[in-house]
Image (spheres, rainbow, N blue to C red):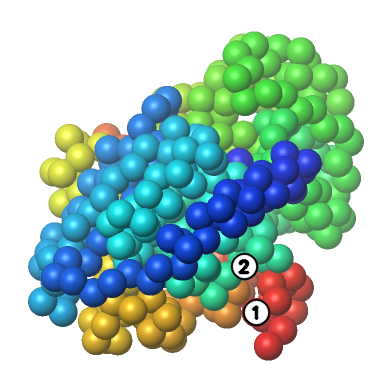
Amino acid sequence: MLNKFQAGKDGRRSLLKLLSGALLSLAAPAVMAQASGGDTLKMGLLTSFGGSQIGGKTVSAAAQMAIDDFGGQVLGKKIELLIGDEQYKPDVALSVARQWMDQKKLDVLVANTISASTFALVDLTKQAKIPLLLTGPGSEDLTGKDCSEYSTNYIWNVYSLPRAVINGMSSEGAKTWYILTIDNAYGKSLESNATEFINAAGGKVVGVSRFPLSMQDYSAFILRAQASKADVIALGTTGDNSVNLIKQATEFGVMAGGQKIAALSMNIQDVHALGLEQAKGLRLVSPFYHNMDEKNRAWSKAFQKRANGVVPTLIESGVYSGVTHYLNAVKAAGTTNGEKVMEVMKTLPINDFQMKNVTRRADGQVMRPMYLMEVKSPAESKEPWDYFKVVRTVPAEEAWRPAAQSSCPLMKK
């Protein structure tokens, strides 16, 4: 889904942390230099412009829209948005962020990055003592064992999205599950959480198949899942993987044969690529839907004017909310000093078009509700992009991992 969410629980992640630690040590004197006043607030946005994943131009438009709506300045300082292409490469993300800190005296970093890149950025911003706004990465470790007092997660993670989908389908009678997932850290993290939720609901995982991110032909994996006779085939996939897998599953008659498909990580752009005829009945979870109510519709229409008509997803809306929350904190703190701004961000509630009185938990998680949604049939859809019906509002305490189960050291204080 949110399509930049390759998280971190395998050996590659450990190697990355060692390498990034070495790089940070080499650059320590420059990194430790705190942002230095001046007449401009420097905000860095790291995203990716390649491929079909959510990010790039639309995310940049959302960040700039938030800045413009705030008035383009704060505390008498002009707000300058620096945009960098992460290229889905952790070393590139780390290099760009270090350069901004060394040469531009960065005040805040917005990370619309893959999780593998974000772990290095967490360490970097912690040393530099500047806020890190997480608006894309999905690893739960970012608010778990790798949490930071400078990081805030605004949108989702691999715990929040699948839980409501699995619980909802289990309550409707689903007992056996087959998981198809991307063979990377994100996929494994999603698979682990999905298995936890399935077992807790009294179900059973009867099989798992993993495939590379670059996979095009899923026939062998679909046939295995079909042969398992599982009630539900759960997809731990994102973007093109999800779209192509569902299309091929339809060709193999998976749903026609009585099996259901649960999209554990999917967004409205994926549904649009599929078409309602193939996507109808799919269950998914999101913290945002552009057609939810009048406030969401008004904001979405304003965004579309800036983004060449592109309908916003949870990612663009999350970037806007994160940037606005930070700027409100700067205004309230009366300074751009990272430590002082973070003290305000920890308690300042978020009130905007999509959230009301939502606060940040000590582990950095923004405690917002989620929405369990079902894709409409073509007959139910009344206008373009009228794709979802809200089945249930999932309260924040149900959507996110309970505080008592947190592995974040900051939750123990």
Which amino acid type corresponds to the residue marked 1 in the rendered image?
Leu
Task: Identify which amino acid the numbered label 2 is placed on.
Answer: Cys
For this rendering, which residue is in front, 353 or 133? 133
Quadrant of the snapshot with the C terminus: bottom right
Q: Which residue is mark 2?
A: 147
Q: Is residue 255 above or below residue 303?
A: above
- Position of residue 142 relative to residue 232, above or below, is below
Q: Is residue 265 left or right of residue 190?
A: left
Would you say residue 377 is visible in this rendering?
no
**Cα–Cα span, label 1 and label 2:** 8 Å
The residue at which mark 1 appears reads as 410
x then y, percent, for residue 259? 73, 29
- Which residue is pictured at 42% across the width and 81% down the height? 339
Asked if disc 1 and disc 2 are in contact, CB closer than 8 Å, the reply is: yes
Residue 11 seen by the camera: yes
Could you classify mark 1 by the number of other residues whose Cα lies within 10 Å: few (under 14), some (14-19), or many (20 or more)? Answer: some
Quarter of the image holding residue 232?
top right
- Place of residue 80 in the rendered image (x, y in percent of width and height, measured from the top left): 19, 58
Q: Which comes before the other along the chain, label 1 or label 2?
A: 2
Total tally of numbered discs in the picture: 2
Q: Nearer the viewer, residue 13 or 295?
A: 13
Please report the residue visible at 13 percent of the width from the left and 66 percent of the height from the top: 78
